[in-house]
Image (cartoon, helix red, strand yellow):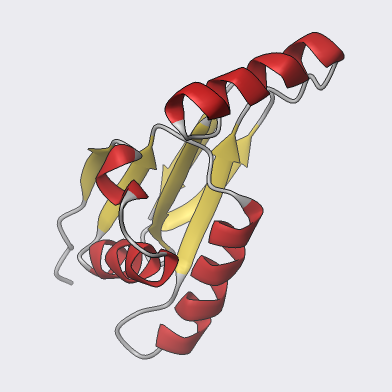
Amino acid sequence: MIKSKVSLEFIPYEALRGLPLREQVKYIIAKTKENKILVFDSKLTAEEEAKLISETMKNIGPKFSGIEISSLSKEDKRLGEAIKDWIFKILTGKNRGTSIIGPAKIIKQIKRNPESISIAMK
């Protein structure tokens, strides 16, 4: 059995921010097809995740079994935290948090708790 090479790629949100959503999704799917696990320094929006999942389903086939995705952000939604989130979004254009996306054929399980994400790989 030939093992595939896996790499971890850290991508700043700014690298994709100027692209239309369709191109962002295309980029992410292409990278995961190359056995790359992507780590973004921003939490994907609900719209971005929905589009990514929708387009991934269209690409599933014998060589691509889909993606695993998980996002981590502070779940505390008290007024003070909500204001910090809003200010951060206004100043940086991104959501506070981290998103991890990888190929389903490599990622066996992603466990998320309030403080961290752990990835078990095949």
Going 30% across and 39% down the picture, which residue do you hit? 14
Quarter occupied by the C terminus: bottom left
Going 14% across and 69% down the picture, which residue do you hit? 2
Going 53% across and 39% down the picture, which residue do you hit? 43
Using the image as rendered, state which of residue 34 and residue 105 is in the foreground. Answer: 34
In this rendering, the answer to whether 64 lies above or below 73 is: below
Rendering coords of residue 108 (x, y %) = 48, 55
Using the image as rendered, state which of residue 60 and residue 40 is in the foreground. Answer: 40
Residue reaching furthest to the top: 80
In-image side of 57 versus 61 (left or right): right
Rendering coords of residue 15 (x, y %) = 25, 44
Q: Residue 33, located in which quarter of the rendered image?
A: bottom left
Number of numbered callouts drawn: 0
Going 52% across and 82% down the picture, which residue do you hit? 57
In-image side of 59 versus 48 (left or right): left
Residue reaching furthest to the right: 78
Q: Residue 1, located in which quarter of the rendered image?
A: bottom left
Using the image as rendered, state which of residue 49 and residue 5 is in the foreground. Answer: 49
In this rendering, the answer to whether 35 lies above or below 118 is: below
In-image side of 108 versus 86 (left or right): left
Rendering coords of residue 23 (x, y %) = 32, 69
Residue reaching furthest to the front: 90
Res 60 visible: no
Res 103 visible: yes
Rendering coords of residue 17 (x, y %) = 35, 48
